[in-house]
Image: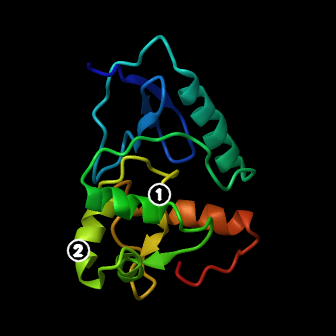
């Protein structure tokens, strides 16, 4: 049985977002205009499952600074290793960062740092699975499929919402 995937496009402070979902869960949230990994435009569907409308509501709250955590059903498609990395990403608190090395340690394999970085870059749920919160060991902004300027914006936005205007890494 093939699942029907519904798609909606919304404008955000970071450019157009493509939201895809079945009737039960989100399947991806991508930056349409990302230079590194653009999302090819799909046909927007007329019918919108409730989960897409709920995401639009929650992302609007996130950008307004009134939401720090997302409460949405998502469906990761990938290997067990990838799913494990993505699950660990979801545990990084709002406004906090960790290094790729620390993420590797959290999955129990410090030597898997390159695979962790690749998996982080293949995250299909921009913003809600916070791959933007992973930085270089030296505190530098490295690797973001949505382009580094968006990563910087997201981290600065979260810091501002938390009242931390002094961000040493930028």
- Characterize the local packing of mark 1: few (<14), some (14-19) or many (20 or more) Cα atoms within 10 angstroms: some
Residue 28 coordinates in the image, percent (x, y):
40, 39
Q: Which residue is mark 1?
A: 150
Residue 162 coordinates in the image, percent (x, y):
73, 68
Q: How is the image coloured?
A: rainbow
Question: Could you say which disc has been placed on residue 114 in the image?
Answer: 2
Q: Residue furthest top?
A: 46
Question: Could you say which disc has been placed on residue 89 in the image?
Answer: none
Examine the image and state in which quarter residue 58 appears.
top right
Residue 126 coordinates in the image, percent (x, y):
45, 50
Residue 152 coordinates in the image, percent (x, y):
50, 66
Identify the secondary structure beneath mark 1.
Answer: helix
Q: Is residue 77 left or right of residue 28?
A: left
| Sequence-first tag of 1 and 2 | 2
Counting every numbered tag in the picture gives 2
Q: Quadrant of the N terminus?
A: top left
Q: Visible in this render: residue 126?
A: yes
- Please tell me which residue lies in front, 56 or 164: 56
Q: Residue at x 30, y 50 (%)?
A: 35
Identify the secondary structure beneath mark 2.
Answer: helix
Examine the image and state in which quarter residue 111 appears.
bottom left
- Please tell me which residue lies in front, 17 or 87: 87
Real-space Cα separation, disc 1 to disc 2, in angstroms: 22 Å
Q: In the figure, 153 relative to 164: above or below? A: above
Q: In the figure, 113 relative to 38: above or below? A: below
Dots 1, 2 in contact, CB < 8 A:
no
Q: Is residue 61 left or right of residue 141?
A: right
Q: Nearer the viewer, mark 1 or mark 2?
A: 2
Q: Residue at x 64, y 63 (%)?
A: 158
Q: Residue at x 46, y 35 (%)?
A: 26
Q: Visible in this render: residue 131?
A: no
Q: In the figure, 26 relative to 88: above or below? A: above
């Amino acid at each position: 049985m093939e699942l029907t995937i519904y798609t909606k496009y919304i404008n955000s402070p970071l450019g157009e977002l493509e939201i895809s979902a079945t009737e039960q869960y989100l399947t991806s949230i991508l930056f349409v205009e990302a230079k590194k990994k653009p999302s090819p435009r799909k046909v927007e569907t007329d019918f919108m499952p409730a989960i897409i409308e709920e995401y639009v509501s929650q992302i609007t709250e996130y950008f307004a600074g009134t939401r720090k955590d997302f409460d949405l059903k998502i469906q990761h498609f990938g290997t067990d290793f990838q799913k494990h990395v993505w699950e660990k990403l979801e545990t990084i608190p709002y406004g906090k960062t960790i290094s790729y090395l620390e993420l590797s340690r959290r999955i129990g394999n410090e030597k898997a740092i390159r695979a962790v970085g690749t998996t982080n870059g293949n995250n299909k749920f921009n913003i809600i699975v916070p791959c933007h919160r992973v930085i270089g060991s030296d505190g530098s902004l490295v690797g973001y499929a949505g382009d580094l300027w968006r990563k910087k914006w997201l981290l600065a936005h979260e810091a501002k919402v938390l009242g931390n205007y002094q961000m040493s890494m930028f």
